[in-house]
Image (cartoon, rainbow, N blue to C red):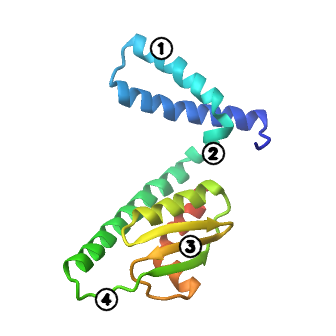
Amino acid sequence: MENLTLSDKLSRFILNWFFLMIVWIAFTSSFSGQELIVGVITTMVISLLSISMFTCCTLAILSPIRIVYMLWYFVVFFVALIQSNFDVARRVLSPSLPINPGIVKFKTKLTTNYSKMVLANSITLTPGTLTVDVIDDTFYIHWIDVKTTDPEKAFTEIAESFEKILLKIF
């Protein structure tokens, strides 16, 4: 477990509590007094118990510029998702299209485990690629059509657009 300052613990608690409360309201679909009181107490207890386990970030993650970058990340991810869906669908519907499956590796500049997890999940959620392993700063990706085995070019094709934004968020 990491050593957290009181300020970090409080910041993580507030952030965790805030998001859990949003989830509570979304699931209950209610703003009645009793529902909100139970929600506040329940999410507060969960937040207190999970400060160091599930929360990676402090309130700094909610700065306006980072929120803008998060929104931009979703746009970039959505575009990549649509493009790769069409590419995979085209390959499935046209068996004559060549495929060249294989595993490529590349290094990332991301430093936090959380940012690496976001990148790995974004790659996996994009059809045609699957994150096989992440060891330190090296990603191993299964790619449906390996266009290059050069790590720098593979990084550019698969992850560069995601990483540029993630570096500004985390």
Q: Specify the label residue 77 is tagged with.
A: none
> Mark 1 belongs to which amino acid?
Ile
Q: Going from the N terminus, do you reach mark 2 or mark 1 first? A: 1
Residue that numbered label 4 is attached to: 98
Residue shown at 20% from the left, 82% from the top: 94
Element type at mark 2 = loop
> Residue placed farthest to the top in the image?
34
Q: Residue at x 69, y 66 (%)?
A: 136
Give the left or right position of residue 77, taking residue 141 as reference: left
The label number, if any, that marks residue 37 in the structure image? 1
Instruction: Find the distance from the CA under tag 2 to the CA under tag 4.
Output: 43 Å
Of residues 77 and 67, the one drawn nearer to the viewer in this rendering: 77
Per the image, the residue denoted by label 3 is: 140
Q: Spatial distance from mark 1 to mark 4, Cα to Cα?
A: 59 Å
Looking at the rendered structure, the kind of residue marked 4 is Pro
Of residues 76 and 145, which is closer to you in this image?
Answer: 145
